[in-house]
Image: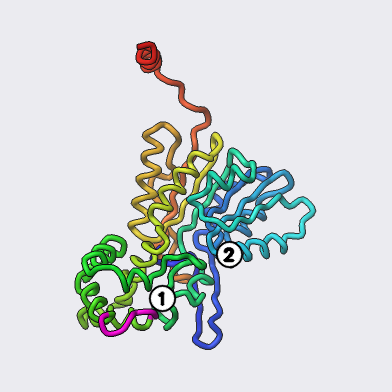
C-alpha cells in the first residue's frame, strides 16, 4: 500500500483529489463479469472499479461494495445512484473491513460469489483527507479511517526505540530504520510528535543528506510502515484473501492489485497455497502490470501488480487410498 490506487492531483489551495483507477481494462478482462454474476468489490476506494463492475452487471446481478472508510462507501452509493438503468443490479454498500468478508456475506445472505476484486492501493480521496496519510502536508498524525483508538501518533510517541526500528524496517523495508527510530525518540523527548510535519522533520534528521536528494521522499517508507501498523493491514490482507477464496463459486475469479513487495508476497503465497491445495489455478502465472501508456499518464500506477486466481470447476475427489485411511483412523 505504498502507493495509492489512483493518481492524485492535490493543491495547497483547494485540496481536491483526482481519481484514476489503475489497470481498469485488465481487471475487467480478467474478471469477465456476466450480467447475472454476484460480484464483490472489497475495496471501494474512489469507486472507479466499482462503477465499471456495476456497468457490466444487469438485472439478476448483485454487487457488494465494501470499505472501512465511510467516505468511500458514500462514493459507492453515489456511483450506484448515477446508474439510472431499469435493469441495474441489486447493490449492497457496506462500511466494514474486508477481513470480515464471511460475516458480511452471511449477513446479506449471499453465497457463493462469482467475482471478487481487491485493490490494495489508496484512493486519491483518502490521501487528500487530512488524516496524516500524506507527508506532503502538515496535518494530524492519525493514519486511520475513522475514530479508531489506534493512531500513528500513539505508536510514534509511546513505542520504544527498538520497537519503532523493527516496525519501520519490517513494514517499510527502510534501510535507515534504526537511525530514524533514534531520531524520533530524541525529537519526542522535547515535544510530542502529533503532526506529519514534525514526524517528517524527525525522519530527515535521522537520514543522511544524500538520501534526501533522491526521487523518493525519505519519509515514504516510514509512513508506509506506520500506516500498515495502525490499520493492521497485513493480517487483514491474509484474512481477507482466505475468506475470498472460500467464498468463490466454482469457476469464480479473484483479482488482486497490490502496490508493494510486502503485499505482493502475501498475495503470491496465499494463491500458491490455494493452488497446491487443489482449490484452483493462477492465470497468467506472472502478475499483470500497467503498460507504458498508463504509467506515463498515472505515475502512481508504476508499481501496481495484478494477480488472478480461478476456483476449480468441481471439487476434487478424495484419493481412494486416502479415503480408506481416513475411515480406518475413524474406526480406531
Quarter of the image where the C terminus is located: top left
Left or right of residue 154, residue 245 in this image? right
- CA separation, marks 2 and 1? 19 Å
Residue under the point 64% across and 41% down: 109
Residue bearing the label numbered 1: 141
Above or below — where is 275 with respect to 168?
above
Residue under the point 24% across and 68% down: 160
> Which secondary structure dominates the residues rendered in magenta?
loop
Quarter of the image where the N terminus is located: bottom left
* Rendering coords of residue 151 (x, y %): 41, 69
Residue under the point 46% across and 25% down: 316
The circle on residue 178 is: none
Left or right of residue 56, residue 305 in this image? left
Give the residues drawn in magenta, as a range. Answer: 189-196
The circle on residue 70 is: 2
* Rendering coords of residue 145 (x, y %): 50, 66
Look at the numbered disc 1 and give the secondary structure of its residue.
Answer: loop
Q: Is residue 193 magenta?
A: yes
Residue occupying the far bottom of the picture: 13
Left or right of residue 26, residue 85 in this image? right
Amino acid at each position: 500500500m505504498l502507493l495509492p490506487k489512483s493518481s492524485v492531483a492535490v493543491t495547497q489551495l483547494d485540496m481536491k483529489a483526482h481519481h484514476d483507477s489503475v489497470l481498469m481494462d485488465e481487471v475487467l478482462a480478467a474478471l469477465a463479469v456476466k450480467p447475472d454474476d454476484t460480484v464483490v468489490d472489497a475495496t471501494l476506494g474512489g469507486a472507479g472499479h466499482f462503477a465499471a463492475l456495476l456497468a457490466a452487471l444487469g438485472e439478476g446481478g448483485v454487487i457488494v461494495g465494501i470499505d472501512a472508510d465511510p467516505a468511500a462507501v458514500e462514493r459507492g452509493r453515489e456511483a450506484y445512484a448515477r446508474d439510472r438503468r431499469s435493469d441495474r443490479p441489486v447493490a449492497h454498500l457496506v462500511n466494514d473491513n474486508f477481513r470480515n468478508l464471511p460475516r458480511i456475506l452471511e449477513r446479506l445472505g449471499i453465497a457463493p460469489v462469482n467475482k471478487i476484486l481487491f485493490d490494495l492501493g489508496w484512493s486519491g480521496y483518502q490521501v487528500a483527507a487530512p488524516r496524516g496519510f500524506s507527508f506532503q502536508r502538515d496535518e494530524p498524525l492519525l493514519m486511520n479511517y475513522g475514530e479508531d483508538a489506534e493512531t500513528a501518533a500513539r505508536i510514534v510517541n509511546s513505542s520504544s526505540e527498538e520497537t519503532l526500528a523493527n516496525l519501520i524496517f519490517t513494514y517499510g523495508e527502510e534501510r535507515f530504520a534504526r537511525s530514524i527510530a533514534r531520531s524520533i525518540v530524541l525529537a519526542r523527548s522535547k515535544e510530542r510528535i502529533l503532526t506529519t510535519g514534525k514526524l517528517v522533520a524527525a525522519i530527515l534528521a535521522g537520514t543522511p543528506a544524500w538520501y534526501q536528494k533522491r526521487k523518493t521522499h525519505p519519509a515514504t517508507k516510514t509512513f508506509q510502515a506506520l500506516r500498515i501498523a495502525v490499520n493492521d493491514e497485513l493480517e487483514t490482507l491474509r484474512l481477507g484473501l482466505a475468506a475470498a477464496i472460500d467464498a468463490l463459486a466454482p469457476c469464480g475469479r479473484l483479482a488482486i492489485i497490490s502496490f508493494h513487495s510486502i503485499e505482493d508476497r502475501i498475495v503470491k503465497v496465499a494463491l500458491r497455497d490455494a493452488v497446491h491445495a487443489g482449490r484452483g489455478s493462477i492465470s497468467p502465472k506472472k502478475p499483470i502490470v500497467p503498460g507504458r501508456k498508463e504509467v506515463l499518464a498515472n505515475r502512481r500506477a508504476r508499481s501496481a501488480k495484478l494477480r488472478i486466481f480461478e476456483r476449480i470447476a468441481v471439487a476434487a475427489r478424495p484419493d481412494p487410498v486416502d479415503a480408506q485411511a481416513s475411515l480406518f483412523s475413524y474406526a480406531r
